[in-house]
Amino acid sequence: DNRQLAGLAIALCAFATALATGSNGFIAAFVAGIGFGATPAVQVPDSDESGDELPELSGELLALVVWYLFGAALVPLALDHLTWQVIAYAAASLTVLRMVPVALALLGTGLDRRSVAFIAWFGPRGLASVVFAVLAIEELGDSAVAADLAVGAVTLTVLASVILHGVTAGPAARSYGDAGDATATDGAAPRSRAGLISGRHHRRR
């Protein structure tokens, strides 16, 4: 609709304006998106849903371009600068540095351990991390070694996330769903037995 088209236009304008003034285009587009999202939406009755396709297709196209550049340029760079420190950081970023803060944030929510582990594990690193890698290249341009190290660490983390989260998504989701169904069944069984006993008691009276 018109609102989605306006959102896309505002993001592009903010990005272009920031680049023209020597500022960071990604941050400008991000802030513009926050401001646009905070404005109340006006509902238009009987609006044509075909207008939703352009922003969605534009987003998908941009995502494909980013992933193409990621695979074509950043992955070879990461493999060329592969060290044990980079591997250790990637492993820590997908486990300890991700799961522990999520678990702490979920304290007091009443979720069981299985739910906390599921939420904490599925925090994939994707397009946002690639954007941060681009920002690192801009900020560390004068230091090629530091830039290569930062980009290598981010790229390996994203690559490992794509593989590990992609492989475990199906089995983990099925296991989590089966556990939820089993819990619901176990909770319903005592109530069913209680209802059966109560029914028998009334019939005897």
Image (spheres, grey):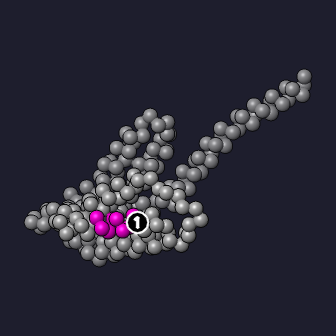
Seen from the viewer's position, the closer of residues 195 and 58 is 58
Residue at the image position 32 percent from the left and 68 percent from the top: 12
x, y (%) of residue 56?
Answer: 45, 69
**In front of the other: 67 or 122:** 67
Q: Amino acid at mark 1?
A: Ala
- Say left or right for 109 vs 95: right
Q: Is 193 placed left or right of 104 in the picture?
A: right
State which quadrant residue 193 falls in. Answer: top right
Q: Main secondary structure of the magenta part?
A: helix
Q: Seen from this angle, which residue lies furthest left?
A: 142
Which sits in the foreground, 55 or 83?
55
Residue segment shown in magenta: 7-14
Secondary structure at badge 1 equals helix
Which residue position holds label 1?
6
Instruction: Answer above or below: position of 124 versus 76.
Output: above
State the image coordinates of residue 90 (x, y, percent, origin top left): 28, 58
The residue at the point 49 percent across, 39 percent down is 111
Magenta segment: does it hold 199?
no
